[in-house]
Amino acid sequence: MIDSPIVKNNPKLLVFVPLFYTVWSDSILTPSEISVLEGLLTSQDWLSEQERKFLLSKIDPKQPPSVDELNTWKTAIAQVTQQSQTKETLVNLGIRLASLQGNGTVSETLDKARPALARIEGILGFISHEAIFNFQAGHKTITSEQSTQRNFDVAEMTRILDGHQAAIINKVKTLLSDPEFTYVGPGDLDLYRKQVLQWCKFLADQGYGAMAYPKEHGGQGDMAAYFAIMETLSYHDLSMVIKFGVQFGLWGMSVYFLGTEKHHAKYLKDIGTLELPGCFAMTETNHGSNVKGIETTATYDHATKTFNIHTPFELARKEYIGNAACHGQMATVFAKLIIDGQDYGVSAFVVPLRDKKGKLHPGVKIKDCGRKMGLNGVDNGVIYFDHVVIPKENMLDRFSSVSEAGKFESPISSDNRRFFTMLGTLVGGRIGIPRSGNSASKSGLTIAIRYGDQRRQFGPEGGTEVPILNYRTHQRRLMPLLANTYALHFALQHLTERFLNRTEEEMQEIEALAAGLKSFATWNTTATLQECREACGGKGYLSENRIEVLKNDTDVYTTFEGDNTVLMQLVAKSRLTEFRQEFANMNVFTILNYVAEKAKTGITEMNPITVRNTDEAHLLDPEFQLNAFKYRERDILTSAAKRLKRHIDSGMDSFDAFNVSQHHLVQVGFAYIERIILEQFIEQINKTSNAGCKATLKKLCDLFALSQIDKNKGWYLEQGYMEGVKTKAIRKMVNQLCWEIRQDAVPLTDAFNIPESCLAAPIAVRS
Amino acid sequence: MIDSPIVKNNPKLLVFVPLFYTVWSDSILTPSEISVLEGLLTSQDWLSEQERKFLLSKIDPKQPPSVDELNTWKTAIAQVTQQSQTKETLVNLGIRLASLQGNGTVSETLDKARPALARIEGILGFISHEAIFNFQAGHKTITSEQSTQRNFDVAEMTRILDGHQAAIINKVKTLLSDPEFTYVGPGDLDLYRKQVLQWCKFLADQGYGAMAYPKEHGGQGDMAAYFAIMETLSYHDLSMVIKFGVQFGLWGMSVYFLGTEKHHAKYLKDIGTLELPGCFAMTETNHGSNVKGIETTATYDHATKTFNIHTPFELARKEYIGNAACHGQMATVFAKLIIDGQDYGVSAFVVPLRDKKGKLHPGVKIKDCGRKMGLNGVDNGVIYFDHVVIPKENMLDRFSSVSEAGKFESPISSDNRRFFTMLGTLVGGRIGIPRSGNSASKSGLTIAIRYGDQRRQFGPEGGTEVPILNYRTHQRRLMPLLANTYALHFALQHLTERFLNRTEEEMQEIEALAAGLKSFATWNTTATLQECREACGGKGYLSENRIEVLKNDTDVYTTFEGDNTVLMQLVAKSRLTEFRQEFANMNVFTILNYVAEKAKTGITEMNPITVRNTDEAHLLDPEFQLNAFKYRERDILTSAAKRLKRHIDSGMDSFDAFNVSQHHLVQVGFAYIERIILEQFIEQINKTSNAGCKATLKKLCDLFALSQIDKNKGWYLEQGYMEGVKTKAIRKMVNQLCWEIRQDAVPLTDAFNIPESCLAAPIAVRS
């Protein structure tokens, strides 16, 4: 076109080159676009018939320009764009191009044609708008300019996270950086299990295993440190963590909490040094969640003063027992105690499995559970007992015992309550697991966020490619999960402190809190690592980048120490019990007052101004956020209670009533836990003095609060607690917070201070 | 208590035994409960002071009854419950117990005390209600009675699913049941890869590999059968499926679609028999999603008429290339064509990698990608080219070529458009992958649903344990996913048919459809298998039950053939283009009419009666469902277009405008795809004649439609398209449909007719 005689004769025709180039180079010419272009050409009265025909031929889909012709157009356009600094319309570019040939002056003809030309550009819309950048180098945008900043002191943030346990955390991190802790692959199961055992031995040698046991039995009596150790070890291989937890937590703590002084003296020291590897044999094939129903029997023999431990049928075997397949020499076995044919409910017994050389004792049969989705460094096994006889003193007799006279004795008369009291002493597992899972989330997020900050893909036309973490969808994927992880960190610290300083009266509440936080946190870990995997694309799929193993190892966290769905229902039942108490205390007048009080709160929160309030200051006000969480918690609980009552009053069996309401009850659990998490996050911010850290934590807290509200917006809208205008503003604010936090995202993961040797992922590690 | 002289003296005191038993046996005595009980006892004027004191001592938390005493209470109560058939209150039980001692007559005293006693029972609430069952055997409930039914003909449903491809599907299923296809574990990478290659060879020998190639090149020219084969093979090892797809799909189809007759004649036959294993080398480390930006070069040498294939720097290496690490002898390599220093964009070239013996050709360097999250039977590798020279005829020259004179030629002048046209011919991969993923979902659901139907846990007090699939939360986890899987099956068949019968004009639309369905389906697979894992608890975590491998193998489906998030944005852009065309055709009056038309539709759908309509017939009306989906699709698209325009008009760079709207654009993609899926499901039901199948499919379709609306209810409420009363009714209906479909769930998975040898999971397989 450029060199054709027609154009040489009338350089003004060059005005069409940028439009034509754009149409051909980028988008497919649609029939409607062709008709618009044809109309435009036809209406230009300054064109001769021949010129018009020539131009029409240039937009004929049947005769596309050759590749070389397209290149000559581009080169021509480049002449006028290289001078230009600012964005220009295609029409202006065309006029300048035409003028260039006409000695730099814009002819009157072209000036008159401008509006018609501009109209077609308007119809082409943003495509024409974008096209300009084809001709310019170094096109910069807000998106491409975003980058990592450091708006707070990373070391200070680490101090805030570590709190009182900083010293032991740093010690463990230093230890984990030792070459001893080089990862091994899961290919050879045998090798992997041996390595994991060796690591645990190494940790025991440092005194970490016995940390929580009393000093007189080789420990430090420091339970808080034990939790911090579990959490920190979880930056490394999680099979090691679980093996560690099985040995020193489940096995050791069951002896400690369910046994008495004679057991402590006999076993604890050797457990703490890993001289005596052991198991925690509670779950049976037929009874996992409903563990109260286990069927292994421990039958007392008056004559010999022994218990006979027995698996009465195939599916009453102990299953998934960690440490059982290879290394465990003893086990705490849960079994129904039978005396003279009478069933006295579940008690716990120490049962030897193997001798020091690993040879199984008579009557003990063990099968290997084989490969699992993850945690393949842990030797899970299935255990059968065929009339294994143990002496009377092997009964862990803190909560139940058999007297010298062969009579059952217990400070707790109800079998049910005794069983759950026993379980209650083991609630530490429901603290250790979510803390371990949250560490895995931190590792996954560190890898994915560092990668997203480096990895560039796509970019503005004519500009360089952009870090993928600058894309809004990428931010929406990862930033709320980063906020959740921080939020859970503080909530789990709160749970740990409440557990460590518990009184008898608080136990029920703490158990509910542990069950709920365990569920929320481990589900969050699963979701986080899934998102991290996808956010790293193909790189995330390679084992070397470790997101896979983090995901697969922690996947069972939602199942063990109690299935999350079942636990959330327990939380709900516990909440309903408190609710029941609240009502039981009230006479009719109090109830009326209560309802009136509730309505009053409603009036404040649900007035027509508040439900439509979209002010930034309001949305970021912790009082608004917490009120919204509390309102939801209270309303869902009340409606669940009413619903159950309505069903039961109408004659429905209570078991059915609970089943019909199950989905609702899980929401009761969530609403309670979410409120606790937010409350603790706000409290943490209040007590943070460092300004930079405080401001950054506030943003994370806002993101946590508002993304939870956004997730539950259907509910808030249904209730009339918010109107659409407000939920829309919240969504917008969530996006905005993601955009802002992205700048601090790398430092925020740096603050986790995970040893580089633990991260190990080539896409993330810094030299 | 029972045997104490006080009670012997006054047997009426036995009236308290059931209440006391319940309080002690089940729940913890709270202060409020104690005070209520104390109040009750104090107000009974028929009690002597001594009796009252005695009774108060029985509810003193400091003096719990002994285990044996509790047992005597239970035994006493059993005397009066064994006669009773129906549920009774604790008070009635107590009165009957007291009367038993008093020769069977209810004393006047007790009758008078009845209201006061009943009050305390009311305050104890459902706990007292439930307690009765402690004393009764065989407590049955609606929940425990639910069981698997067969409301439709399973074989007929299988015929509906298989459609025209039933014959080939059955052949493949028979083949897969051959002992040749016994699974191997992932422990030994080398062994596993060899086995996978052998399986593919076995399939090639049956003619399955070449199925889609023309008859003259050893095939059957049957692309429809090829897709059905991929889908059916996906009930077995997915490494095999991907290796099969790399060889016969990516490698073979790239030669077929991007090459010309000379390439077909030279390569296709050997590719189809697996004589010539090959790769598809497009992705580079630096360019995955933005594959247009690849940097490998193919420089033309006029003198020798050859191309020089070269990796210009480390991160321009080809990465994740299937078949590259071990077996590939050739590859279709995508590279920028350079002639005389001019870049002519991306073209494809056949490049030899290894000789028949596996020795690498000079200049080719390959590294093994090593272990991956899954698909470890596929040998992915990294390829570097160091000035590898190939003859001119190795250019796959359907869309671009170099003339004898050394000039670039192409029927498509724009590099951009040429590249995407080339990619467009390979869209089949985006059909094969989601169909494969949906098969994996079917396997996972079959395992989880069969297990849920058998596995019993918990149950009503005094009753047997209940299949976990009878629990509402378990149903809510699995039934909507079962509905999605059916819905996607039909939608993917529709996509396949559109692709097979495509015209040039439809290609853009079909590409968007494929991209969107690929994303929706593969995300659904990931979510489904995650849920199945959790729904099977510890059993789901054991590798032998195969959910793990299904999950890990398909996890990368959301990444390859295009990252889902990126693809959904492509879908959105395609939808915006259509939208732009719609507007371009309109003059001002048409636009006004269009808006008026839209408003009119709004008036019908959003009138105050409809937005509050909760009638079952309305909610289950396909017209209502489809209208809701369409409204959402249209509204989200319109608002995205307006939003983009507003940003650009306000001076925002279009790249930034798209980034700010990214989250919105992904929703545009979802809304479009969801509408298509629903439309196709409804159409499938309309053409189903068998009444049982039709009714069952209708339920699944209702569940799909309503659970999607429920998922998006926040949006519908924000828009005012529905009010809270309606979204609540929809949630209730979703629960109800889950409950109903649960009865057909096992037969619905039976209809997938997956070979038992493929399922293989011990928790699911039938002998």
Image (spheres, coloured by chain):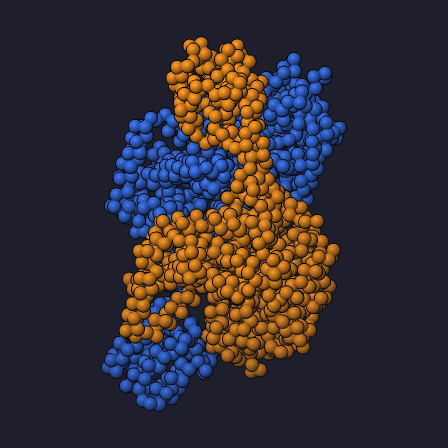
Chain colours: A orange, B blue
Residue A117 rendering spot, x and y as whole percentages:
42, 23
Q: Is residue B564 above or below residue A702?
A: above
Q: Residue at x 58, y 31 (%)?
A: A137
Horizontal placement of B201 versus B506: left or right?
Answer: right
Left or right placement of residue A479 versus residue A226 in this view: left
Query: Which image quadrant for residue A116?
Result: top left
Observer-nearest residue: B506 or A690? A690
Residue shown at 54% from the left, 56% from the top: A696
Residue B450 in percent (x, y) is at: 47, 49
Residue at 38% x, 46% y: name it. Answer: B715
Q: Position of residue A210 (x, y in %)?
A: 66, 69
Can the viewer see residue B61? yes
Task: Give the image location of residue B313, x and y in percent.
Answer: 69, 34
Count of marks overlaid on the render: 0
User: Residue B575, relative to residue A10: is it above or below?
Assistant: below
Q: Which of B564 and A484 lies nearest the eye of the viewer?
A: A484
